[in-house]
Image: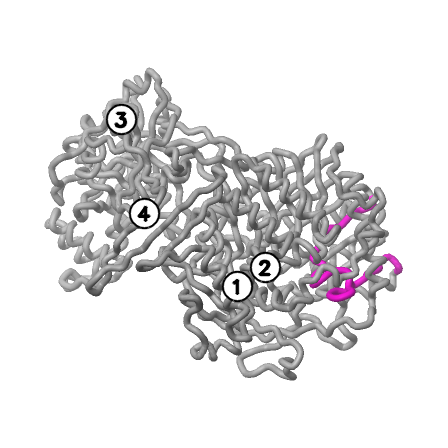
Amino acid sequence: MRNDAVDFVARLLKRRPELRDDVAARLGGAAALEGTDAGDIRALETIVSEQRPVFFAGQDATGQSLIDLADASIRGDEARYLKEELERRQAVVTPLLNRIGRIDVEGMTGAPFVGTGWIIDDGVVVTNRHVAEVIARRSAAGYSFRMGAAGLPVSLSFATGHLKSEVMPGVAIPIASVLYIEPDQSAVDIAFLKLSVQSSVGTLSPLPIRLASIGESTPLCVLGYPAKASPRIIPDQALMQDLFRDVYDVKRVAPGFVARQAPELITHDCATLGGNSGSAVVVMETGEVAGLHFAGIYLRENQAVPAHLLRDYRERRRWTRPPIVETGHLQTTLQGAQAGATTITITITVNDGTTSVSLGSGSGVRSVEAVERAAASFLRQGPRALLAARLGYGEDESEPPLIVAAVPQSRLGEAAAWPASHEGIPVRYEAATLSEQLNAQSYLEAAGDISYDDEARSERQFALEPITEEMSVRAHLSPEHGFEELQSFFATATGSLDSAMYEMQGTKIAEMVEDALARGLVMELTADRKSEPPEPGEKTSSDPLKVEVSAQFAAWEAGHQFRYQIVPLGRRGLVASAYHIKVTVDGGGRFWLSSGNWKNSSSQPIVNETMRQRATETDLPGNRDWHIIATSPTLAERFRNHIRQDFRRSNQLEHPEGLEIEPMVLVAASSEAIEERKPPSRVLPPLEISGLIRAQPLLTPDRGGRAYTDPMLELIRSARHSLLFQIPYIGMRPDPSVHRGNIDELIDALVEKLKTLEDARVLLRMGNDGFSDNRHVSWFFLSRGVPGDRLRQIADHHTKGMVVDGQRVMIGSHNWSSQGVSVNRDASIIFNEPRLAGYFGEAFEIDWDRANRVTTKRFVREMPELMTGGEEMASAPAGFALKPLSEILGEADD
């Protein structure tokens, strides 16, 4: 901030030389004024902050517009000067106020409005591109409004009221359509909206736009609707509350001066906040618009589209031209730094609804299909160390695709001697993710190798068909309410508890179980080996939040009210690599089903009401998980019967001959830091509903995974307007020529909806890179023509849920990996229930708004390496550690 503050002081003294002594005193002496680097930076910041007051727009007793000059914080001589100037120019500025409006939105999560706009032409409102993109999206036919929460339609209006105190309400005119959004590659952040034809529209005449330049000493004011900012944006909350009088979302007038002027940008120093996007920057003396505010760094520099560009857009009526959507064949020549040119060719072919995208360099065209064929060929003909080969992209996605070949971390150093291209296509070598290494172990993918007993589950009590019955469902989220709701479920459970759980840790989890047993409940637990009790003498974690609950199993068994069974995995085990389910059924016809493990350190953190109240400023600890507690006698019975059969079958398979020794994984001792998750915009309380509800239970590995895959394909293909999918990772195929059955059917169906639906989005977990790589998903989507803005990632999300058309929702524990949708044990449910879909759709929107795009840049990191057969080692080299595969998989699912 120092240079900006120094510039501010220089401009201040140029306008007001009589303030020199006062400013010098604050900076510690006259010498501080001589150098741009002198003085206390805090003093500079204070001078900047004190000089820009903010005033309420108001009304007199008859409802006429005015500016409330009394209710404002005036700090410093320049602030008083600006107030006096605004008072002198009230007659010029106030007639503009009723042509400034909020762009209100009903039906979307978050704030009730997305920005500010003003009348630029008859029935036309101008605002910012980034404001319009929140409510609309481009398409070949023009622009369409986005779906709101849970895929439901939104209602939009241009509202000129929203004053601190209103004698007469302003007009609220529906927004009929989006006329034009400037393309992203343009530096001009502008868009135009069409108002519905109403009598009130004719009373709103366009604002005048300035033709002449603006002098440095010419006072300006910003007319718009500032919204409250979080401490992450405005660290000095007390200052914000003072300047804005701790009142937000209402029409304000903020005076200041121009800072810099350039052909495509002007900057000003008026005080603004989020919500001011789209505000009019007005010259006080004439009432002319000098700019369209679009961005700013609070109390440093605010940016606006200059008046001459606004005049040009209005005179040419740019909004009457159709959106730029390129079709057919486009050829562009890019001049490089050296002499000559590079030709990039993009070919888009549409046949029977299928889009094929080809990119080429020079005279040749490199199609997606050709690269995938070459990658599959290279996987078979290239170095024996290859574990995977796929289509990928360089750091610039606009370049033609290439082959990305994955090898074990320990072999990566040999890549310099390996082929740099294959069939004329460049090859890039990267360290294989753990997922790619597991996929290379063919036995782990063989569904026929497990001993799951479908034949024993053919009777009615095991049926996995949809049911419709009277039920109640309590939906809730972690970290906000996860443990609190789980604890309540245990505290009110009756009779028996049948639990199926991947992982149990934490002293609070142990206390919860102990309390239930002390009340006389009987508990039978079927669990993954992640929850296996420690060997005699083996130390459990010293971390009280991560203490192994399984250390208590023996004591609980001694009381004759607790039994447990660890599920055998792998060949001839019950499931392939993970008993990943999270379900508990009590004796009263209720069940708890979730995406989250029983771990206080991640999926079930201890969160109190004080923490929830501060959650929008300081993010809560723990994972994002979706949970339900349902009372449904039929569903409870079906899940209980499967869990009890898992217990019996696992007991039969407990010590089969020929089980493999668990592989070990070599991992780097240190890990990369992951960007922190931003706080949510709001905290959702639990939602309880009841009534006649249709639900479809989903279990794997039943029927080889088809008991999950077929209903999920039906759900995805049923989407007509929106599909919101929150999943930690999607396991992409390591070999383009091999179709992996269930998972690839699901991915293909998802991609089709991502390409064709009005609103289809996928939210992945950030930090998967050691196990799976989100770049691979991004590359695949890009190659299939999926718009880049439909994929984001967020840290610490563990949800596995999907919301379709705001009507149906899937919630559960199924990861989208080859094993996760076929040969591991998981449980999910599809509810045909708009209330539940709306709740979890809103949760998705909250996370989407704080997520980041998936970067395609190449990263250099130490990847974990699977040790098998002759590669086993007794100890890890320096800087590395050896861990069991189950532990690594557990960390990936943490």
> Which one is closest to the eye, mark 1 or mark 3?
1
Extreme-right residue of the structure:
560
**Mark 2 or mark 4: which comes first in sequence?**
4
Q: Are marks 2 and 4 in contact (CB under 8 Å)?
A: no
Pick the quarter of the image with the C terminus: bottom right
Q: Secondary structure at mark 4?
A: strand
Residue for badge 4: 330
Q: Please, what is the three-letter code of the amino acid marked with disc 4?
A: Leu
Task: Give the mark, 3 or 2, whose residue is nearer the N terminus.
Answer: 3
Write down the residue under mark 1: 376
Lower position in the chain sequence, tag 4 or tag 3: 3
Q: Say left or right for 244 vs 837.
A: left
- For the record, the magenta segment spans 560-587
Label 4 vs label 3, nearer the camera: 4
Q: CA distance from mark 2 to mark 1?
A: 9 Å
Mark 3 residue type? Leu
